[in-house]
């Protein structure tokens, strides 16, 4: 079978041949007329010679009439040949035009069929004239079902149809004034009732007295969700930075309070009234420290101690605790994959996060229900990891906590990880629990997602990195009694109150302390040749150099120097 381009070439060759034949016939007609003139002249001369006279008589008249008859016959024959040639040429041109139109229509259909976007063609009243395969996939309606139907009734939700029809009534005039077409967003409804956010581009086409609207439609639901997720992530990052800064300063104040209250408690232990007061202060400071820990957890700035964790063992322990403390109306179910990998995370923080989620689930099941704890292995590609907010593609341990409680309204589902946001009554929660879980998981290099439906419960799914190497505490570790010494300690701390408190505590243990407010002061002390045995430095400090950079520079000058880092 010839391709369209080959067919057009063949038609062009046939047309050229017909044109050449026509020109040849016209040339022959001209030659015939010229020959007729010559024949007529010869006949006249012959008649004059035969009669021996130069007068125009009957013989000459017969010769002229015979010559004219021959000429008429030649003209008619040539004219008919030319007409047949012109008819063939016209037929060839018509066939070529029809073929060109057919090729154009086939090309248009091919473009529509292979386009990534759905194609919908309607008339000015909204009746569907064309419905591509992609439109079938997008909406769930087949081409046979859609052709001849009202497009508004197919893809627009019932409450919005009246407004959409008014919009369509203005669409054709707007498109007529905009030859390049219009691009707009709209919400479609799939055949199964699912809402689809779409981007449409429409153009108007007039065929004689008929007007059609051609529209390409693209599903942008996932794209918009990704954009909103990015905005939410940026917002949470900004809030986290602010929260972390505040918590850091607050933690410095609590360090002084908790430290000095221990000294006071020791001094007034023989005075019951004062001992009671110091105990109240200490308990309040402990609550403040717990609040600060939650804030730092959300801000992803608390010091984690990740180790290899058997999540099944941890969840079994949690299930036992929940069975002993939860109301008997709450059923605890475990579905643990016995081949699940070890996770790499802070065990204490993970326990707190799981307990927090379990308590939230219990609070959502006041009339009883089922709490299901599930583990499994998952392997993420780049897209899957981004979808759950994980740090990278690879192997993860999935921990799922699902309840059958009241669920979370969709309107607030995206805000549940925000700090200080809570659906509980005033006084029933700080709103830091879920934000702490979010911060811990993100700082651990994992991800977390939530799915909920009002009246059908909530499912939190946590993804933690798979452990690659053991980081367990060495065997034989024990909590030994603190023993003082007589060495000299260079104490570098940018907060004045914390620096003074640390100095007092170290001196109470017998050490000599050289205080420095920042890395610059510490380097100046070292440059003077002042002897000291230990560099005791905060990691995060104001100024141009942090604790790690200070230690590297000092150890380069004093290779035998020992360093103790502290933070929070």
Image (cartoon, helix red, strand yellow):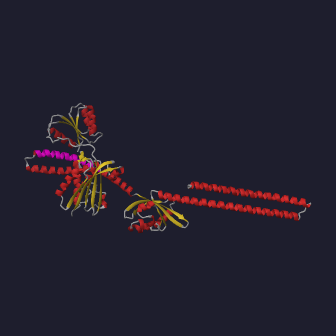
Residue farthest toward the left in the current orientation of the protein? 270
From the viewer's perspective, is residue 372 above or below residue 518? below
Determine whether, in the image, residue 151 is placed left or right of residue 373.
Answer: right
Q: Measured from the top left, where is residue 461 in percent x and y?
A: 28, 54
* Residue 505 visible in the current orientation: yes
Query: Could you tell me how many numbered marks the image carries?
Result: 0
- The answer to whether residue 247 is magenta is yes
Quarter of the picture containing the N terminus is bottom right
Q: Measured from the top left, where is residue 177 in percent x and y?
A: 51, 62
Residue farthest toward the right in the current orientation of the protein? 52
Q: Measured from the top left, where is residue 535 in percent x and y?
A: 22, 36
Q: Quadrant of residue 19?
A: bottom right
Q: Main secondary structure of the magenta part?
A: helix
Of the pair 108 and 417, the residue shown nearer to us: 108
From the viewer's perspective, is residue 266 above or below residue 95? above
- The answer to whether residue 344 is magenta is no
Residue at the image position 82 percent from the left and 57 percent from the top: 38
Instruction: Tell me where the magenta segment starts and ends, as one range.
Output: 240-266
Of the pair 21 and 392, the residue shown nearer to us: 21
Q: Measured from the top left, where is residue 124 in percent x and y?
A: 49, 67
């Amino acid at each position: 079978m010839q391709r369209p381009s080959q067919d057009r070439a063949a038609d062009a060759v046939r047309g050229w041949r017909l044109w050449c034949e026509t020109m040849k016939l016209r040339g022959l007609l001209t030659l015939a007329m010229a020959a007729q003139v010559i024949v007529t002249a010869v006949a006249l001369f012959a008649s004059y010679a035969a009669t021996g006279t130069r007068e125009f008589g009957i013989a000459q008249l017969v010769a002229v009439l015979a010559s004219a008859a021959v000429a008429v016959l030649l003209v008619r024959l040539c004219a008919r040949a030319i007409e047949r040639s012109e008819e063939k040429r016209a037929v060839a041109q018509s066939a070529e035009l029809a073929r060109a139109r057919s090729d154009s229509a086939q090309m248009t259909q091919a473009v529509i069929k292979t386009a990534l976007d759905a194609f919908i063609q309607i008339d000015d009243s909204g009746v569907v004239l064309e419905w591509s395969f992609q439109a079938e996939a997008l909406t769930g309606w087949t081409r046979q079902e859609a052709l001849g139907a009202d497009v508004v009734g197919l893809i627009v939700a019932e409450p919005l149809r009246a407004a959409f029809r008014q919009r369509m009534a203005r669409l054709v005039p707007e498109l007529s004034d905009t030859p390049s077409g219009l691009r707009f967003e709209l919400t479609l409804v799939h055949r199964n009732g699912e809402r689809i956010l779409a981007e449409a581009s429409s153009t108007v086409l007039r065929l004689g007295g008929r007007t059609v609207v051609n529209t390409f439609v693209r599903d942008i639901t996932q794209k918009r969700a990704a954009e909103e997720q990015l905005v939410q992530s940026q917002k949470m990052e900004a809030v986290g930075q602010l929260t972390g800064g505040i918590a850091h300063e607050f933690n410095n104040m609590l360090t002084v309070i908790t430290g000095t209250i221990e000294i006071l408690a020791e001094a007034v232990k023989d005075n019951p009234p004062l001992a009671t007061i110091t105990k109240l202060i200490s308990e309040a400071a402990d609550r403040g420290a717990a609040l600060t820990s939650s804030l730092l957890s959300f801000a992803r700035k608390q010091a984690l101690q990740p180790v290899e964790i058997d999540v099944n063992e941890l969840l079994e322990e949690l299930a036992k605790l929940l069975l002993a403390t939860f109301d008997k109306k709450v059923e605890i179910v475990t579905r643990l994959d016995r081949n699940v990998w070890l996770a790499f995370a802070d065990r204490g923080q993970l326990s707190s996060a799981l307990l927090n989620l379990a308590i939230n689930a219990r609070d959502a099941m006041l009339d009883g229900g089922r709490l299901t704890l599930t583990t499994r292995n998952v392997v993420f590609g780049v897209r899957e990891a981004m979808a759950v907010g994980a740090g990278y593609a690879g192997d993860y341990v999935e921990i799922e906590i699902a309840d059958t409680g009241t669920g979370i309204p969709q309107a607030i589902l995206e805000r549940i990880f925000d700090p200080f946001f809570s659906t509980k009554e005033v006084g029933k929660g700080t709103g830091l629990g879920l934000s702490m879980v979010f911060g811990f998981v993100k700082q651990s290099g994992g991800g977390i997602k939530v799915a909920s439906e009002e009246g059908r419960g909530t499912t939190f799914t946590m993804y933690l990195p798979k452990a690659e190497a053991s980081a367990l505490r060495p065997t034989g570790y024990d909590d030994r009694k603190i023993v003082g010494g007589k060495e000299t300690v260079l104490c570098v701390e940018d907060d004045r109150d914390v620096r003074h408190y640390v100095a007092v505590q170290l001196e109470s243990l017998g050490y000599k302390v050289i205080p420095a407010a920042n890395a610059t002061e510490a380097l100046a002390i070292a440059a003077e040749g002042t002897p000291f045995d230990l560099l005791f430095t905060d990691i995060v400090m104001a100024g141009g150099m942090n604790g790690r950079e200070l230690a590297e520079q000092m150890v380069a000058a004093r290779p035998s120097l020992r360093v103790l880092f502290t933070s929070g």
